[in-house]
Image (spheres, helix red, strand yellow):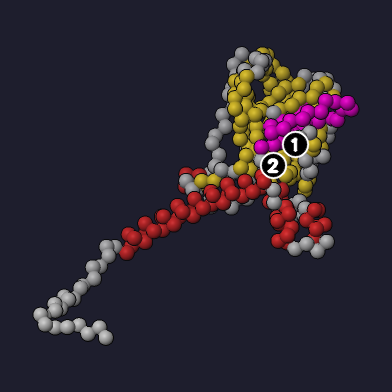
Amino acid sequence: MPHFGKFEVSVVVDGKALPEYGITTSEATKSVACWIPSQEGKVGVNFLCPVQAGSEVYNNVQAFSVMLENKSYPKALKISVMVDGERINSMVLHPEAVTRHRFSDIITSSTTYRDLLFSRIELTDDDDFLNANVKDLGEISLCVYTGTIGGARSDFTTYKIPEKKVHERSKKALGHQVKFGKEKFMAPQNFVNFTVTELIATFVFKYRSIDILRADGIAPPDPAVNKRKANGATDDEIEDEDGDEDQDEDDERELKALLEQVNKIQSKLAKKLSKKAGPKKKMKREPRPLLISGEVIDLT
């Protein structure tokens, strides 16, 4: 589990921590980074500071959540969560506070929120997105700051998340991105001002589908596949055994989208070729001789 100082963070799906791959720690930037396998429709994150025995276990299915546990940290803290490069939520903790908090949504007003979900990446052929910044796409980050708590705030700044699409010619292999569920209501929230003094820890989780992580050599091969290979199964047999209904549906959707793109490209090429060719030349026809009365055509 990635940790820095007294802080620990884990990503949880269906109540179980996801495996982390390629964990790197930088004392200079006070940061920890790693790779995790994403699953469409499901994600959860635990933020622990530090682990406390007997603490509540959250089972959060199909929602992105960051759970923070603070055991008597001596300074006031601000925790900010970002997904795909955009800030979606934050909270302030008083000094010596003992708490465990879960971030599972983006706050849209003082009384409404929307769940965060993994979703299939949205591709487009719109050239307006060709140079779009996708640097932070595919990342979940959590920053811990110390500072001073100010007075209460009556206003609320709505987090506005811009539409993010990836151009089909982009070379960044992703597979998933974070999207938002339906708007829900909650009890009115209290907001305070916070003056940041220092960034003391940053955790970055780079999420990709397990297939991409394995293909890039980041995650180890599927042990079940290795076992069947050891038993003499061929690659084709293994592929057939691994197929399930959910994967079939995903493959069908992906194939349909690809076919639509192919049809669009073929249509564009056909139009360009027809313009270059110009109008078709008319074939000159020779006059057909007429039969003179009394002449006979020999059909033998």
**Mark linked to residue 39:** 2
**Residue 294 image point, x, y percent:** 11, 82
Question: Where does the N terminus fall, quadrant-wise?
Answer: top right
Q: Is residue 119 above or below residue 100?
A: below
Q: Is residue 297 left or right of residue 240?
A: left
Where is mark 1, residue-wise? Answer: 13
Q: Secondary structure at mark 1?
A: strand
Q: Is residue 112 left or right of residue 77?
A: left
Q: In this picture, which residue range is highlighted in magenta?
A: 41-68
Q: Nearer the viewer, residue 105 or 22?
A: 105
**Residue 164 image point, x, y percent:** 55, 39
Measured Cα–Cα span from mark 1 to mark 2: 9 Å
Residue at point 14%, 79% (across, down): 291
Residue at point 59%, 49% (across, down): 252
Residue at point 71%, 27% (across, down): 103
Q: Quadrant of residue 49?
A: top right
User: How many residues crowd mark 2 within 10 Å: few (<14), some (14–19), many (20+)?
Assistant: some
Q: Is residue 106 above or below residue 176?
A: above
Dot 1 amino acid type: Val
Q: Secondary structure at mark 2?
A: loop
Q: Is the Cβ of the residue at disc 1 closer than 8 Å to that at disc 2?
A: yes
Indicate whether residue 47 is drawn in magenta.
yes
